[in-house]
Image (cartoon, rainbow, N blue to C red):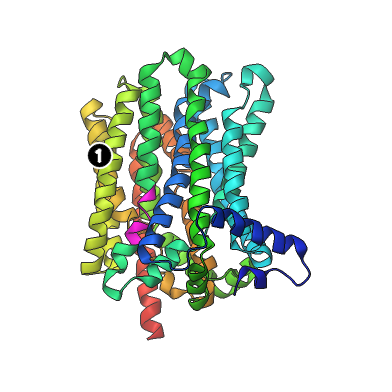
């Protein structure tokens, strides 16, 4: 199926939207006919890195900036909790973005969908960079921040291009763990860039200037990166060979109601199977920044450097996860890492309350575990989906996993820890590990029954 076939007969807008996406892509070389696995891998990493950078810029700002800029009327803890509540809105909006984008793709084509999604993401990010503060316009600033955050979530849901699924299905049988890992490398790269940029700004300019104007620069950078990523991804998506490979594997969008009725159980199993990784995700990236700011004397810029080092370790661990998964199996790898995360959760309170050394150890070990587990968290049970549901099923599975595993992690971890103790960080991580192990067990049982 080509994009012209997706557009309804006589729909000039549909033909125009599709041709516009192709024209943009062709302008940067998108008329390339052959798409190799290495091309797909590069497209996956570039696309995911830009998206993760965008989201991490917002996440870091939620911990370091927004409590003072948008919630100055509240104490620092309460302001941070308010900021984390708005942080979660994007993950709530993301499934709606997926549903909307699938409808757009069916009518106007994947190029038009991807162009609209990345344009919305860039616009929302740039909008945040130019937002007035609470002191300037009052509660209107908070409302605008929430609106732009929701737009980011809708855009991220719409940015699904099918590249990770195509990459996984193109992988040799004995290299699936390796190819699955490639799609996840965007996370540590995105965080590394965001953390390094914020570390430079917080160390280079006075705190007053940083809160006044310095924090806006990472959002400008995120907008620029989104533009570059858009052209890189459109170049690949518009290639004839790419469309042919998607068609051959039936990687086309399906209706949300249809897939929910037919494959709803598989969506939930897939989401819960990855929950240990998603629960750990924001516990080692966003939550510690708020804890350090509120309850530690450690320098924020120095701590961001430690997190950047952790991101490098996570990237190396992801590479290792590909080798490990190809040797012992992806599901066994994910289950083993869930157990490791459960064990790690028992040490979390002691490390976080253990001064600079303990906190840095928590970050570095946590990032290694995150790399090993998150490297194999995507599409581990995607084979459960019927072929024609895999494209939309993979997107919705990720949406649900983010929503239940990571969306509220900074809010819940900080709120409970501040009021009842750091032991609740352990409870949060342990619950994620338990959900992963349970989902993998349920999936194995269902497979045995089908056999």
- The image quadrant where one finds the C terminus is bottom left
In the foreground, 336 or 115: 115
- The image quadrant where one finds the N terminus is bottom right
Specify the farthest residue to the right: 10
Q: Is residue 259 left or right of residue 451?
A: right
Give yes or no for residue 182 being in the magenta stretch.
yes
> Relative to 266, does residue 212 appear above or below in the rendering?
above
- The kind of secondary structure element at disc 1 is helix
Which residue occupies 38% across, 71% down?
170
Which residue occupies 51% across, 32% down?
219
- Residue designated by label 1: 364
Residue 346: % across, % down: 26, 44
Residue 141: % across, % down: 65, 27
Quick one: label 1, few (<14), some, or many (20+) residues within 10 Å?
many
Q: Is residue 443 left or right of residue 250?
A: left
Residue 415: % across, % down: 46, 34
> Relative to 197, does residue 105 appear above or below in the rendering?
below
Total number of numbered discs in the rendering: 1
Can residue 318 be seen in this snapshot? yes
Residue 288: % across, % down: 36, 33
Q: Which residues are magenta?
A: 180-186
Give yes or no for residue 77 being in the magenta stretch.
no
Q: Is residue 38 left or right of residue 81?
A: left
Which residue occupies 53% across, 76% down?
388
Can residue 442 be seen in this snapshot? no
> Relative to 62, does residue 49 appear above or below in the rendering?
below
Specify the farthest residue to the bottom: 451
Which of the 4 image quarters holds residue 323?
Answer: bottom left
In the foreground, 331 or 101: 101
């Amino acid at each position: 199926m080509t994009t012209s076939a997706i557009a309804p007969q006589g729909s000039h807008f549909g033909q125009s939207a599709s041709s516009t996406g192709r024209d943009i892509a062709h302008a940067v070389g998108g008329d390339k006919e052959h798409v190799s696995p290495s091309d797909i891998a590069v497209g996956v990493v570039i696309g995911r890195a830009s998206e993760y950078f965008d989201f991490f810029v917002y996440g870091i700002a939620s911990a370091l900036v927004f409590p003072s800029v948008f919630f100055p009327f509240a104490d620092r803890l309460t302001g941070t909790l308010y900021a984390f509540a708005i942080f979660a809105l994007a993950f709530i909006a993301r499934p709606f973005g997926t549903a909307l984008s699938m409808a757009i793709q069916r009518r106007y084509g994947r190029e038009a969908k991807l162009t609209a999604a990345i344009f919305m993401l860039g616009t929302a990010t740039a909008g945040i960079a130019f937002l007035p503060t609470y002191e300037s316009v009052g509660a209107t600033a908070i409302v605008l921040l929430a609106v732009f955050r929701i737009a980011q979530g809708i855009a991220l849901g719409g940015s699904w291009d099918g590249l990770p699924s195509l990459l996984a299905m193109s992988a040799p049988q004995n290299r699936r763990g390796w190819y699955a890992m490639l799609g996840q490398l965007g996370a540590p790269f995105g965080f590394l860039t965001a953390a390094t940029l914020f570390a430079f700004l917080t160390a280079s300019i006075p705190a007053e200037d940083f809160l006044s104007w310095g924090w806006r620069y990472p959002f400008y950078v995120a907008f620029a990166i989104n533009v570059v990523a858009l052209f890189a991804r459109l170049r690949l998506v518009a290639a004839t060979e790419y469309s042919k490979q998607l068609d051959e594997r039936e990687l086309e969008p399906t209706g949300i109601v249809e897939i929910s009725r037919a494959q709803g159980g598989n969506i939930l199993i897939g989401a819960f199977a990855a929950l240990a990784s998603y629960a750990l995700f924001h516990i080692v990236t966003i939550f510690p920044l708020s804890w350090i700011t509120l309850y530690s004397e450690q320098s924020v810029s120095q701590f961001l450097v430690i997190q950047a080092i952790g991101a490098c370790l996570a990237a190396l661990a992801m590479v290792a996860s590909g080798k490990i998964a190809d040797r012992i199996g992806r599901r066994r790898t994910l289950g083993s890492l869930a157990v490791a995360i459960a064990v790690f959760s028992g040490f979390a309170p002691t490390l976080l309350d253990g001064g600079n050394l303990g906190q840095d150890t928590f970050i570095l070990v946590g990032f290694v575990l995150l790399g090993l587990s998150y490297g194999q968290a995507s599409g581990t049970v995607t084979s459960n989906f019927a072929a024609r549901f895999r494209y939309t099923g993979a997107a919705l599975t990720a949406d649900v996993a983010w929503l239940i595993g990571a969306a509220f992690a900074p809010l819940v971890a900080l709120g409970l820890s501040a009021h009842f103790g750091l032991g609740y960080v352990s409870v949060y991580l342990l619950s994620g590990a338990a959900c992963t192990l349970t989902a993998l067990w349920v999936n194995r049982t269902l497979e045995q029954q089908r056999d």
